C-alpha cells in the first residue's frame, strides 16, 4: 500500500488531551516477518495517557502515534511470513502505534482472534489479559491454594487477573469501588473489598502474591499484607526495594507477552473459562474523550477506540 494515506491520532508535544489530533499519514509497509493490519479496534491503556503527559522515562520521537493494543484484519504480509495470511482476523501488540486505520506488527506479537469475541473485545486483550497472564501465570507462577490479592480488580488488567488466579486454583481477594463489587464477585473472586468503605489490610493478610495496578499509597500499604517469602508484582509504580528486602518480599518483574501467551488466552476465552468485559467505546475522532475517561481510573474493563468495520 505504498504511498496510500490513512487517518491516525498523533501528538507533537507532551500535554493534556488537547494535544491529540487526527491527521493524515502514510500507511506503513510491513518489514520482514511482519504483517500489515487494518485495525478495527484499539485498546486505550492507562500507559497511553501517562506517556502523553510525559510521566514515563522513555524516549519519545515527535510526532508520536500512541497505542499498542489492537484487533483487526491482515491486509498484507511481509517477506518471510508463512504462519499468517491476508484476510485473517487477529489481535495483539504493536510498537508502531495503533490509534490508526492501519499498523504493522511482528508475527511474534499477534494471534488469531478468538471466534467468540468481537473486535472491540479482542482489542482489550493485549495490555489487559496479557499483562494479567504474565503476572499471574508466567512471572507470578500462582499455585493452587495460594492467597492472591488483586488491586483494581474491575479494570482492564484486574478483571483477567481474577479469572486467571481462580483458574490456577488460588484463593482470590479483589479490591474495587462500590459500583463494581458484584461485577468482581461475578468474575470468581472469593472476597471483594470496597476500597471506599474499608482498608484492605483489615481483611487481606498473609498473602502469597499481590498484584498492584494502582500504585502510590495502595502499593506502599500492600507490602504489609504479603507474607515473608511472598511476591509483589506492580504495573503502576516502583516499590521500595529496601523495604521489600526488609520484609522478605520478592518483587517480581513483569515481562512482555508472546504469541504463545496470546494463543493460550484465546483458547481459554473460546472455551468459556475466561470472559472479557470492555468499557466504553469511542471513535477515532473521540480520542480525547477516551483519554479523559481513562485518566479517571475508575472504570470497568478496557476502554476501546472502535476505528472501523
Image: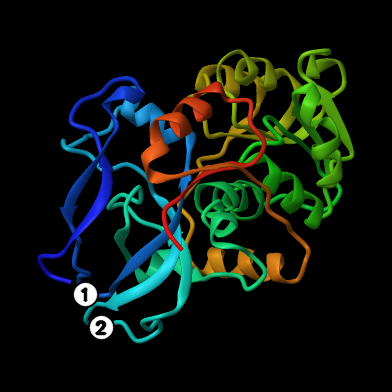
Q: Residues within 10 Å of mark 2 (few under 14, many from 20)?
A: few
Do tag 1 and tag 2 residues touch (Cβ < 8 Å)? Answer: yes
Q: Quadrant of residue 119?
A: bottom right
| Viewer-closest of 253 and 198 | 198
The x, y position of residue 183, in whole percent, is 81, 39
Q: Residue at x 86, y 35 (%)?
A: 182
**In whole angstroms, how far apart are the C-alphas of marks 1 and 2?**
6 Å
| Viewer-closest of 109 and 275 | 275
The x, y position of residue 176, in whole percent, is 75, 27
The x, y position of residue 223, in whole percent, is 67, 21
| Viewer-closest of 132 and 299 | 299
- Secondary element under disc 2, as helix, strand or loop, is loop
Q: Is residue 163 above or below residue 36?
A: above
Q: Is residue 210 in view from this perspective? A: yes
The x, y position of residue 178, in whole percent, is 80, 22
The label shown at residue 254 is none
What residue is disc 2 on?
A: 80
Q: Is residue 58 above or below residue 44?
A: above
Q: Earlier in the sequence, mark 1 or mark 2?
A: 1
Q: Residue at x 36, y 82 (%)?
A: 86
Question: Dividing the image into 4 quarters, which one contains the N terminus?
Answer: bottom left
57 left or right of 39 in image: left
Q: Is residue 54 in view from this perspective? A: no
Q: Residues within 10 Å of mark 1 (few under 14, many from 20)?
A: few
Residue reaching furthest left? 3
What residue is disc 1 on?
A: 32
Q: Residue at x 33, y 20 (%)?
A: 16
Q: Is residue 266 above or below residue 301?
A: below
Q: Residue at x 89, y 39 (%)?
A: 190
Amino acid at each position: 500500500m505504498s504511498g496510500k494515506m490513512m487517518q491516525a491520532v498523533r501528538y507533537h508535544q507532551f500535554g493534556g488531551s488537547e494535544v491529540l489530533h487526527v491527521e493524515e499519514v502514510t500507511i506503513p509497509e510491513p518489514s520482514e516477518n511482519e504483517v500489515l493490519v487494518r485495525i478495527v479496534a484499539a485498546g486505550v491503556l492507562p500507559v497511553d495517557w501517562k506517556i502523553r503527559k510525559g510521566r514515563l522515562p522513555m524516549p519519545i520521537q515527535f510526532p508520536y502515534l500512541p497505542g499498542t493494543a489492537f484487533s483487526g484484519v491482515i491486509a498484507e504480509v511481509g517477506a518471510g511470513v508463512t504462519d499468517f495470511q491476508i484476510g485473517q482476523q487477529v489481535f495483539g501488540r504493536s510498537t508502531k502505534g495503533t490509534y490508526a486505520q492501519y499498523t504493522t506488527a511482528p508475527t511474534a506479537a499477534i494471534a488469531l482472534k478468538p471466534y467468540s469475541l468481537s473486535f472491540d473485545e479482542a482489542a482489550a486483550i493485549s495490555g489487559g489479559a496479557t499483562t494479567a497472564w504474565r503476572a499471574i501465570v508466567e512471572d507470578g507462577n500462582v499455585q493452587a491454594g495460594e492467597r492472591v490479592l488483586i488491586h483494581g480488580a474491575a479494570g482492564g488488567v484486574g478483571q483477567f487477573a481474577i479469572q486467571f488466579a481462580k483458574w490456577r486454583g488460588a484463593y482470590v481477594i479483589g479490591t474495587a469501588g462500590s459500583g463494581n463489587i458484584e461485577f468482581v464477585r461475578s468474575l470468581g473472586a472469593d472476597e471483594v473489598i470496597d476500597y471506599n468503605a474499608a482498608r484492605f489490610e483489615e481483611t487481606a493478610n498473609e498473602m502469597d502474591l499481590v498484584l498492584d495496578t494502582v500504585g502510590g499509597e495502595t502499593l506502599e500499604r500492600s507490602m504489609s499484607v504479603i507474607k515473608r517469602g511472598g511476591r509483589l508484582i506492580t504495573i503502576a509504580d516502583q516499590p521500595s526495594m529496601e523495604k521489600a528486602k526488609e520484609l522478605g518480599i520478592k518483587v517480581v518483574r513483569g515481562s512482555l507477552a508472546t504469541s504463545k501467551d496470546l494463543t493460550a488466552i484465546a483458547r481459554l476465552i473460546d472455551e468459556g473459562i475466561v470472559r472479557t468485559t470492555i468499557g466504553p467505546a469511542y471513535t477515532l475522532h473521540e480520542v480525547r474523550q477516551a483519554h479523559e475517561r481513562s485518566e479517571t481510573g475508575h472504570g470497568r474493563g478496557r476502554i476501546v477506540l472502535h476505528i472501523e468495520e
